Amino acid sequence: MDIEEYFERIGYKNSRNKLDLETLTDILQHQIRAVPFENLNIHCGDSMELDLETIFDQVVRRKRGGWCLQVNHLLYWALTTMGFQTTMFGGYVYITPVNKYSHGMVHLLLQVTISGKNYIVDAAYGFSYQMWQPLELIAGKDQSQVPGIFRLTEEKDIWYLDQIRREQHIPNQEFLNSNLLEKNKYRKIYSFTLEPRTIEDFESINTYLQTSPASVFTSTSLCSLQTLEGVHCLVGLTLTYRRFNYKDNVDLVEFKTLNEEEIAGVLKIIFNISLEGKVVPKHGDQSFTI
């Protein structure tokens, strides 16, 4: 694996030597705008692998995306290779319909330490919940970014990441009540502890998420990619584009329903993905919002 190949894949041409917050932010933003958050392997009859060489081949050489256990694993490798002090953490995702966090440690996120300050870095939550900048690990501070306001809180050694969201304008009237739309202004995202993890800690959940009928990832095909102004999302046959803050404190959300024959072209044109197999788009019953 060659770090220069990774830089080329994400279109990064800036400093390789400055291990500062500016460089970290630049790397994060390049990756989230080049590497989609997606689970399409599952819906092409393939598997989601955790082996770093396999992830590198998939994301860097074959120009695909992946889910958090893959994409943040790749980012961990890139940052440590550059010399950043980087630690893996495990997250518990908030499940809105049941008002609680997942029982299993289903999310991989990173901490990067720069000049004694700790930052949470996550390139793979996707959709409109994706951070665009590292978050300082400090409790109770509103950290405003383009996608919204992020807030970290801490209680009894458990940290919580929440997001304060904008109002939404949906021009397509037939989608006003879509179950893909987030209804909550204040959205809990995930919890985590500061216990260091290794990729081996995620092996069992990686299998569960792509095999269990109870997993949203087996019932729903997902793909999202951040842009300079917003985020493209494809859930099953529904394509959306969210433009953040298109007017004061309002996001514009545009919907389009695709035919199955259009999926391959949309993946290529919008997400820069060329699949080797045919994807079977699915949108199951599990609650999933964009």
Image (spheres, rainbow, N blue to C red):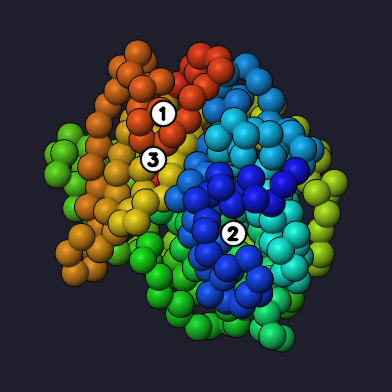
The CA distance from mark 2 to mark 1 is 23 Å
- Where is residue 61 shown, x and y percent of the image? 62, 34
- Where is residue 238 shown, x and y percent of the image? 33, 30
Up/down of 235 relative to 125, above or below: above
Disc 2 target residue: 122
Amino acid type indicated by mark 1: Leu
- Find residue 57 and report its image quarter: top right
Amino acid type indicated by mark 3: Cys
Up/down of 257 relative to 133, above or below: above
- The N terminus, quarter of image: top right
The CA distance from mark 1 to mark 3 is 10 Å
**Front residue (pair 82, 171):** 82
Q: Which mark is residue 267?
A: 1
Amino acid type indicated by mark 2: Asp
**10 Å neighbourhood of mark 2: few (<14), some, or many (≥20)?**
many
Q: Nearer the observer, disc 1 or disc 3?
A: 1
> Which element carries disc 3, helix, strand or loop?
strand
**Front residue (pair 103, 81):** 81
**Front residue (pair 37, 76):** 76
Disc 3 target residue: 233
Disc nearer the start of the sequence (1/3) = 3
Residue at the spot 34% in from the left edge and 56% down from the top edge: 228
